[in-house]
Image (tube, rainbow, N blue to C red):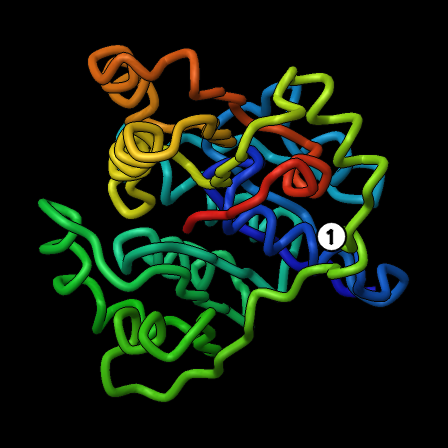
Amino acid sequence: MIRALHIIGSLERAGIQSFVMNLYRTIDRNKIQFDFAIYNAPTENSYAEEAKKLGARIFLIPPKNEGFSRNYRAIRDLVRNERYEVVWRGCSNCFAGLDLVAAKAGGARKRILHSHNTHVKGANLLLHYLFRPLCNAYATQRLSCGIKAGQWMFGKRSFQVIPNGIDTGKFKYNEEVRKQYRADFSIQNRFVIGSVARFDEQKNQGFMLNVLDEYNRLYGNAVLLLVGDGPLKSECERKAKELGIESDVLFLGRRADVAELMQTMDVFIM
C-alpha cells in the first residue's frame, strides 16, 4: 500500500480540503492511503475525525510565519522519518509550493503541485512569481483544477487538469429536507438566496449583501444564507447592520450539512 502525504493549511471545511476529501472517500484505500500535514490544529467541525476513520494520520507542523527554517525541517524530517514517496501540495500560489523543496530533501520521489487559484494580490503576488521557477523545477507532477489555474501556477510548463469532482447524488432534490430546513430557520415563505464559500475577497459576499438589499427594496421577502467563515466575515456582519438588513441575513458559519442547506435555497450565488 502507498501512503501519500498531503501538505495542506488545515482540515477545515473549505475548497481544497473538500476536493481532497471527496477524492479520499472514493479511492481504493487498500491500495492508497492519505496522511495530512497541517499548519492549524483541527476544530470540532473539521474533516479531521472523518479522515482518521478512513485511515489517515494527521501531523501538525509549524507554519512558515513561525520561521521558514522550522517549517522546512519539519516537512523534511516528516517525509524522511515516515518514508513518504509521494507528497501532494494543493495550494493557491507558488510560495506554498516551496514545501516540495523540503519534500525532496526528505526523499519523496513523486512531488505533486496542484493549483487551485488564478490570482492573488499584495506581497503574495510578488512571492508567487519569484518562486514559480523553483516550484516548477521541484514538482514532478503538475495538476490544476482548470486551465487558467494551471497557467497561473505553471506558466508555459505542461500540466494536467483534474476537475473538482463531487458526489452529485448527495445533492439530488429532496422535498422533505427542503421543508424541514426551511422550517428550522423559520423561512418557509421566504425567497432564499444562498452562498457557500469562505469570506474572502474572491468570494465577494459584500456584493451579495448589496444584491439582497436592492432585491428587497424592489420586491421584498428575500433572505440570504451565507455558509462559511473567513477573514471578511466580521466586516460583512457589520455591513449587514449598516444596510439595515441583518434580520434578512443568516451567517451560518462552517457546516457539515452543505448538501441539505442547498435544498433550502431557491437561488445559489457564486
Give the side of residue 176 with respect to residue 71, left or right.
Answer: right
Q: Residues within 10 Å of mark 1 (few under 14, many from 20)?
A: some
| Quadrant of res 210 | top left
Q: Residue placed at 42% from the left, 12% from the top?
A: 247
Nearer to us in this view, 25 or 217: 217
Give the side of residue 52 with respect to residue 268, left or right.
Answer: right
Q: Residue placed at 28% from the left, 47% from the top?
A: 202
> In terms of secondary structure, where does tag 1 sit?
helix
Give the side of residue 197 with respect to residue 66, left or right.
Answer: right
Nearer to us in this view, 46 or 107: 46
Give the side of residue 181 with respect to residue 63, left or right.
Answer: right
Amino acid type indicated by mark 1: Phe
Residue 219 place in picture, x, y as percent: 38, 34
Residue 244 place in picture, x, y as percent: 27, 12
Residue 52 place in picture, x, y as percent: 78, 36
Classify 243 as above or below 199.
above
Residue 145 appears anywhere in the view: yes
Residue lying at the far right of the rendered structure:
30
Quadrant in which the N terminus is drawn:
bottom right
Classify 228 as above or below 25.
above
* Number of numbered discs visible in the structure rendering: 1
Q: Residue placed at 54% from the left, 23% from the top?
A: 41
Residue 64 appears anywhere in the view: no
Residue 34 place in picture, x, y as percent: 71, 53
Q: Residue placed at 61% from the left, 22% from the top?
A: 187
The residue indicated by pointer 1 is 171
